[in-house]
Amino acid sequence: MNPIITLTLQANLRYVRVASIIACNVAEIFADFTCNSTDIAEFCHAYELSVSEAFTNSVRYAKPAQPEKQVTIRFSSDNNSLAVSIIDTNSQFNPVTQAPDISSYPEGGYGLFLIHRLMDTVSYTREDDTNILTMTKQATMTHDT
Amino acid sequence: MKTLLVIKKQEYEWLIDLFPGVHPLLVPICNKPFIEFLVDFAILAGSDALRIVSDGVLGDVEHYCENGSRWGVEISYGSMRPGDDISTVIDKNRRFCLDGRVIIISGFLFIRYNKKREYASLFASLPTGELLGCPHGSISLAGTSTTKTEAPGTLPFSLAALDSIGKYYELSMEILRTGLTHYVIPGYSSEEDCYIGRNVIIPKSAEIIKPVIIGNNVQIMTNAIIDRNSVIGSNVIIDRESVISGSIVIGNTYIGEHLEVKNKIAAGNLLIDPESGTVIVMEDPHLLTTMTKSKVAGALLRRLVHTLGATFLILLQLFPWLLLRPILGMQGKWKRKKEQYYAERQGKYVTLTSTTIECTGALSAFAKALSLDRFTLLFKVLSGKLALIGNQPRPLNPAIPLLPNSPAGYRPAVFSYAEAEEWPEIGIDTEIVEHYYAVHSDPLKDIAMTQKALFHRTH
Amino acid sequence: MNISEKTINNYAIVSLQGILNASSAPKLKTYIAGMPDEQSLVIDLENVEFLDSSGLGALVGIARKKKTGSAVMKLARMNERVKKVFEITQAYTLFDIYDDVSAAAEA
């Protein structure tokens, strides 16, 4: 995986959109070389949505004791897949993948489930008091020819 | 003209248990996904837009049909609530129904038609209201017609409700016997009643009797017989001396040796009797008896062969590994990752360090060609934790538990049978090929397969 | 996000425009909270460029509130990007979804 861009934002909901737009744009530039045109929109939307979810979670679970909190977004790629990592210094969490029980009208808890459904692989690691959530998707869509 | 397709989950739920993982609208009828028959009919009736409305999940259908550009018809999707009646559904799709006439097909129905007949002008002239109805659904027209004509006594199409596996089987047989020319059936057809897909291997000793439909990537082994009225799906292996007659073999199914499948539906490891609806888990008695007989002796011999093979490879790779490992490591092209995988024994795990060599430059290409990335794994063969050749180790994932008691067993290995056969290393195809070899392998064949894997990995 | 409102047949038609995510969802919640609980709603989503699960959560919350207040809440004119989130989470099972605003307000 070759690094593309690393971006550090203040952990504030105000910047959720910044993070997700950048993710969408990086995905678009990346997909331009590998996807056919109809798949690009879907590929970009997956990153836009996943980063929006992950960044929101990072801000939501930030410890109130640290006002100067930051969230780092790191993009890297190899030939045909693009990885984006969301890095924060919050406490360790349990990356549940379960779908929330929709019939009970839940207002939250969809984020990680959505990410798992949108991305090919999602991995969570804890390194030196930081959480690293890495999401990867293949750009070449497999279509029967 | 537009077509509105209204299908409730409750009407097709029975199919989900029989074909798990396949959306009922995508269940194949004569190797053609059910929805495609409806799309064909909508187009034949002069529709330029089709909307599929359901209270169930449509994601897979959407993924398959996309926006319909493949058929030259605009396909969109809508949702409804389980309690909605037809007029509510029309309200919810008012903009879609706004201009022109709309054919409303409601219910999980198969529409019998004949592609050679003219439907577009017929539907344009038919009066508004219900055209045909049955207890399971109806087909009706909304919007005002330009010309006023009475509905003809008999319409050139009829409805068949799909409400049981028996009906599904009956319908498939009906199409096979009398309707193959009425529909567009996938496959190459050089003679009547015979449709064969791409990449189908039929040995000389195998016998095929029409009418028959065979999908893509099908392997029929020696002396197998595909008797009349059979539908073989895609990615199927029919092993030697098995007889299939009057049966439907759903895609991605492996039919073992010496089996007789008559008037059944085979899907994965299920054998369904369409008449009674009973479901049997498929076993191949011949394979099981030979395997259990020599299990202990076979396992010992296999262990010995695998250990010797691994030792040989270690000696072979040792020198290049000592040489290339530090160089590539310094270049940062040697990536290692420690992960837990399922072990052969149920409920046990094994920690493996998987190596990936970044394939840039001559040195790393050379290292890859020699399979040096598997070097450290070979020691796990000596300690008995891995086999030399077998299944690709599956990463530990609580979301995807390893299926217990798979008849062929799961044997995590340094090299996989799929690699040896150059099959794609992911997905259901791999499972089939690994399953096949796991059943058919013996220690000698394992050596040949390891050689093949080593050779193929260099490319 | 911009919110505009009009009335058809006793339904408040709330049209949203822009992004509905964690930073804009509170605005929608506050806006709806300013209405009486028994006021029936149609939320027009045609101009929602982007919706994530925080936006969805807000809509689900409003739906629950309306349900307990025995009022009706409908959604109209959902675009493909928004639909995707409803499809994955199966949230479409909680809403009556129309492709036309006036049809939603009449029924």
Image (spheres, rainbow, N blue to C red):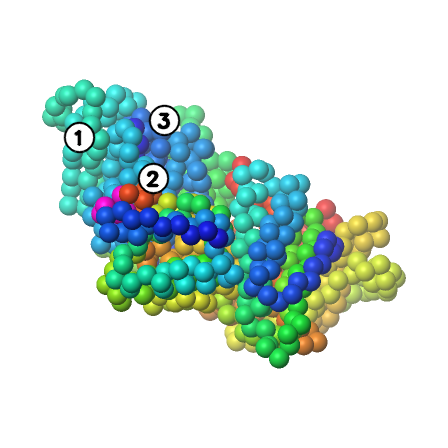
Residue at 65% over, 49% down:
A26
Subunit bearing disc 1: B
Q: Nearer the viewer, residue B426 or B122?
A: B122
Q: Mark 1 sits on what residue?
A: B128
Residue B370: image quadrant is bottom right
Q: Nearer the viewer, residue A121 or B28?
A: A121
Q: Of marks 2 and 3, which one's residue comes earlier in the chain?
A: 2
Residue at 32% over, 37% down:
B96
Q: Of marks 1 and 3, which one's residue comes earlier in the chain?
A: 1
Q: Secondary structure at mark 1?
A: loop
Residue pushed farthest bottom? A65
Q: Secondary structure at mark 2?
A: strand
Left or right relative to B368: residue B338: left
Which region shows up in magenta?
A: C103-107
Q: Mark 2 sits on what residue?
A: B51
Indicate the amino acid at tag 3: Glu
